[in-house]
Image (cartoon, rainbow, N blue to C red):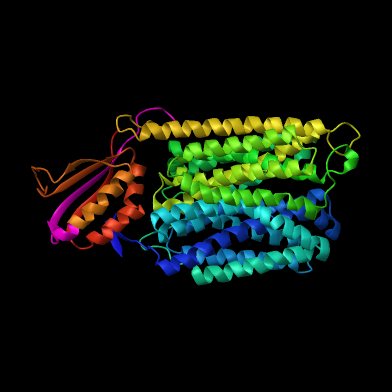
Amino acid sequence: MTGQPVGGVAVKAFPAARSEARMLVPALTFIALVVAAVASLGTPLITSVATSFHVSLGSAQWTLTVALLSGAVATPVLGRLGAGPHRRATILATLAVVVAGSALTVLPLPFAWLLAGRAAQGVGLGLTALMMGVARDHLPEERSAAVIALISVVSIIGAGVGYPLAALLAEFGGVRAAYGLGLIVTTAALLTAWRCIPEAPEGRSAHVDVGGALVLAAALFLVLFLAGEGNLWTRHLAVAVGLAVAAVVLLCAWAVIELRSTKPLVDVRAVRHTAVAGANLAMFVGGIGMYLLLTLITRYAQTPHGAGYGFGLTTFVAGLVLIPFSVLGFVAGKLTPRVRTRIADPLLLAGSAVVVGGGFALFAAARSDLAELFAAMGVLGFGVGGFSAAMPGVILAVTPKSETSSAMSFNYVVRSVGYSLGSAIGGLVLAAGTSPGRVFPDDSAYTTAALVGIGVIAITTLTSIALARRRSSETNPYVRCTHPDTGDSMPKGYWVSVYRTISDPEKLAAYNKLAGPAVKAGGGRTFARGGRVVAHDAGIAERTVLIEFDSFEQAVAARESAAYQEALVVLADGVERDFRIVEGID
């Protein structure tokens, strides 16, 4: 099924058959869950790695940090490759790298090889956005939205699945046995992808901006290094500040490179769109708060009774505390698509952030009983699940289908950095609340950290509410869009369609029946349709249709929506027309 040309290239629509869709959805969910769970394996095994390999805890911490780093760097690169014609090959090759890395973590090799294997496993984190791109291309629009939300959720609750399993295996079989779990499930994910992932639609191209990727990698390395090395801020403040400045300079340089590139790694101009920029800001700040509370609860649960608080749980039992997080996060992810029919995505973000804030408040006020920790973790999971499920809807509402992987990959980079900073902030607050000569922080330090988290989540809530107000104004045709930076009016987008010949009026009538609702759903307003035309010069005095959108990006996204692609399938060869998407002046 081929749609109308865009820029001279025929775009093929690939709605999956019902039987194929039944296989595709579990496959996408399983792959996203596996890569998230495997990347998180380093968290419960840090102490065991330090003991088994005779390295310091700081060195063992890099088994987690290096996975986050490689994932953050690989995500935008894979997102760009996923926007091109070789998406299936990219997914299979990436999973092969993850399997190879998993094998390195199992083999009896020195510590350096373990780090190399963990770095290879972390590359898999970049696949989450590609899974979303596959869902958006190959499933009906109403189905793809729910699946994308589910993929977003399982990419987070995967940590809650992998943590207790890895801890249990490490307790009974050692570190190699725990990492063996990763080898088994990643091999299963590779076979699943080989069997179920379809080819990308035709007519797409992808180019990786190598220079931009290298600069971004250097910047992210500094950011994650500074987030993971808490002692650097307390013992060598000047060095830490210098590296932080260098990271900011590199990020600014990367933005300039992307703006000047004709084929950027990430479309920074699209990222500047109000909805996308606001969503990424909410993800960044919200990620700090979410991971901060996750860190506080798990650390508090493992603190020995001798500190005057805590429960002295083993690594495995502490991992069980994450079960309410995973279960309620999954429940929220399943409920969110239904709620979206009544509540806008930005408001869902705000509501979910409030729920996370409730988790902080619960932890700050009541943590003397283990059941209270389970309750706080469950509230956190429900809030994080709802937040994660609603986030893609905010971004993809103004993103062309072909850019799904790239847009969401940038959001996941932002999320990774936010999570790392959340962990670092938690460590710094607890370190500041540790009395001289004591190993563990005072109980009051956890309360302080929880209050900091409430403040962070408040910022997330306000950002989400501002997004909701912005979307409300954009849906009003009498309110003009404004530029996210200058506040000036933004250029609108227009569909201009001139019908040279109409060979099958019945197909045109069927097309109009489907296209009207699709255009309206995409935010379009029809200004002219088949009225009188006076043609001059080389003009054609035939049927002309003019439709206005609030922005050029919205016009492109509406053209690529599943509903409009269905209309194009009906139209087929019934007409010959000149169809263009044009950016207005203001």
Residue 414 visible in the picture: yes
Please state the horizontal and vertical placement of residue 40, each as a whole percent of the image.
68, 54
Residue drawn at x 63%, y 35% as measured from the top left: 357
Residue drawn at x 58%, y 50% as measured from the top left: 331
Q: Is residue 561 left or right of residue 253?
A: left
Which one is nearer the viewer's eye here, 204 or 395? 395
Q: How many marks?
A: 0
Name the image quarter holding the C terminus.
top left
Please state the horizontal and vertical placement of residue 380, each as a whole percent of the image.
65, 42
Q: Is residue 2 left or right of residue 470?
A: left
Indicate whether 425 appears above or below 24. above
Residue stretch in magenta? 485-508
Q: Quadrant of residue 144?
A: bottom left
Q: Quadrant of residue 442?
A: top right
Q: Is residue 148 left or right of residue 32?
A: left
Which one is nearer the viewer's eye here, 340 or 52? 340
Please state the horizontal and vertical placement of residue 126, each as a whole percent of the image.
56, 55
Residue 491 among those drawn in magenta: yes
